[in-house]
Amino acid sequence: MLKKYSLQILISIITLALLGLIFLQIYWVNSAVTLKEEEFAQTVKSALYDIALSVEKYEAKRRMMLGKDLNSKLKGVEVKKDANGNIVFKKEELEGQMPSEYGSLKYKFGVTYQGTRNIPDEELDEFLSVLYEYNRPRSFEERVPANALDSIIKVELNHRGINAGYRFGVFDMFGNPVFAQKNNLTKYNPKSFTVQLFPNDFFGNPYYLSLVFPYKKTFLLKSMSWVLASSVVFLLIIIGAFYFSIHTILRQKKLSAIKNDFISNMTHELKTPISTISLACEALSDPDISKMEQAKNNYLRMIKQENERLALLVENVLKSALWDKPDLKLKFDPIDVHQIIDKVKDNIEIQAINKGGNIITKLNAENHQIIADKVHITNVIYNLLDNAIKYTPEKPVITIQTKNHKQGILIEVADNGVGIPKEHHAKIFDKFYRIPTGNIHNVKGFGLGLNYVKAIVEKHNGTITLQSEVGKGTKFIIYLPFENTCTNEND
């Protein structure tokens, strides 16, 4: 009882330790994910700052291109004409005022003239047109097109190792989208990453770039894949080791119980013939019995039978150690299955008759010649019939029948005994296993018979299956192939 509670306490402690380790691992992974999210946010904020600078540089380059075009037009400015329509060549300044996106913009240009020529009015109009184009108010998309902004965002994010999918939008100070484009944001998200564009544009309307990452979690988990994978692997290893340890402990406990049960049964089985031999020897030592020839012969016959029984029990125990060995070789020869069944039936039927029952044979197999080990197949049939008689308390009716199936023969042994509970079906072929019936076993045996039967059938490349229901009996079905490729132990 103490050992039982000690095992339960040990399992409970290990289970609690394992659960604690699992929760600690989950907490650690969660903390790592949180830190990764904070690092991601800082990286994106840094990228947004550089995006805003890159946008300003982009617009500045475009304005420089317009400025170059404007300078090219200054060479043809007509400042003053004489009566004949000719320019008076001198150095002057051209001043004026023009509306721009920053309000009213003044201009002043110095012009030097070295000659006399006619300047059409169209050239002055063209200059003023370029100047107006340079200074007129522009929408955001004219200043920075959406595809250019997308390229700037992508370059800055990739430069920082962020290759996650994103969506962006540009909004005014009231949260209205500045431009609408497919796959871009059309509604401001307060939880998005945001930065002001053109922060040095003091007189213009402020614009805000909003950036969201729909698959941020997936990106972060993917970037931490090796951490998560190693954590899962370690946890699985620990859980597997825990399961294996508990399974081994319980199995050892079960094997210990089976061993004790086996020793108890073996002691009982061996004690009976030893006691019989002891009593017979004691009787023979009586001078009166030794003078009675008939009685003496009976006691001697009894001693011989019990000695043979004792030798058989010991031999079965010794042989059980060999059944599971892969190098166990059998002697394969052509045998007649029907002939073996008839012989075993003749030898064992007296046991069924003594209990008021009988054995019925239905040998329907047309081809009943197989390649097998005659001695072991005989023992298989004997064990199944012996079990059927043992586990039928009274009036056993045992049926053994054969029929051909595919490339072999089926042997079915059915009885009307107590049956085997379903929960024991998977264990009934285990070595030393006997169906629990408390501390008393009404049926003698070591729990080796069915284990032996299964081992021999499988070494013949056959199969054995069980069909049983409590109170209605049991049926064992054996399949043995006609041919066998196994080698004889003499080969």
Image: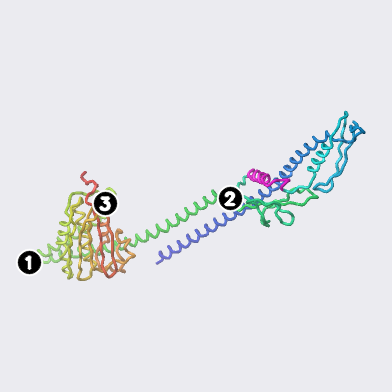
Q: Secondary structure at mark 1?
A: loop
Question: Is 153 in the magenta?
Answer: yes
Q: Image point 76% across, 47% down: which residue?
A: 138
Q: Where does the magenta region start and end?
A: 141-160
Q: Image point 87% across, 42% down: which residue?
A: 96
Q: Residue beneath label 1, please?
A: 292
Q: State left or right for residue 305 relative to residue 7.
A: left
Q: For this rendering, which residue is in front, 2 or 394?
A: 394
- Quote the CA–CA distance across marks 2 and 1: 101 Å
From the top left corner, tell me how far across and down residue 399 is, in percent: 20, 64
Kind of residue sitting beneath label 2: Phe
Q: For this rendering, which residue is in front, 234 or 131?
A: 131
Query: Principal SS element in the magenta part?
Result: helix
Mark 2 or mark 1, which is nearer to you?
Answer: 2
Quarter residue 129 falls in: top right
Mark 2 or mark 3, which is nearer to you?
Answer: 2
Q: For this rendering, which residue is in front, 485 or 447?
A: 485
Q: State left or right for residue 21 relative to residue 167.
A: left
State which tag comes first along the sequence, 2 or 1. 2
Kind of residue sitting beneath label 1: Met
Q: Residue beneath label 3, please?
A: 461
Asked if residue 486 is positioned above or below residue 291 in the image, the reply reads: above
- Quote the CA–CA distance across marks 1 and 3: 56 Å
From the top left corner, tell me how far across and down residue 382 is, in percent: 20, 60
Q: Quadrant of the N terminus?
A: bottom left
**Which label sits on residue 219?**
2
Q: Is mark 2 in CB contact (under 8 Å) with mark 3?
A: no
Q: Quadrant of the C terminus?
A: top left
Q: Secondary structure at mark 3?
A: loop
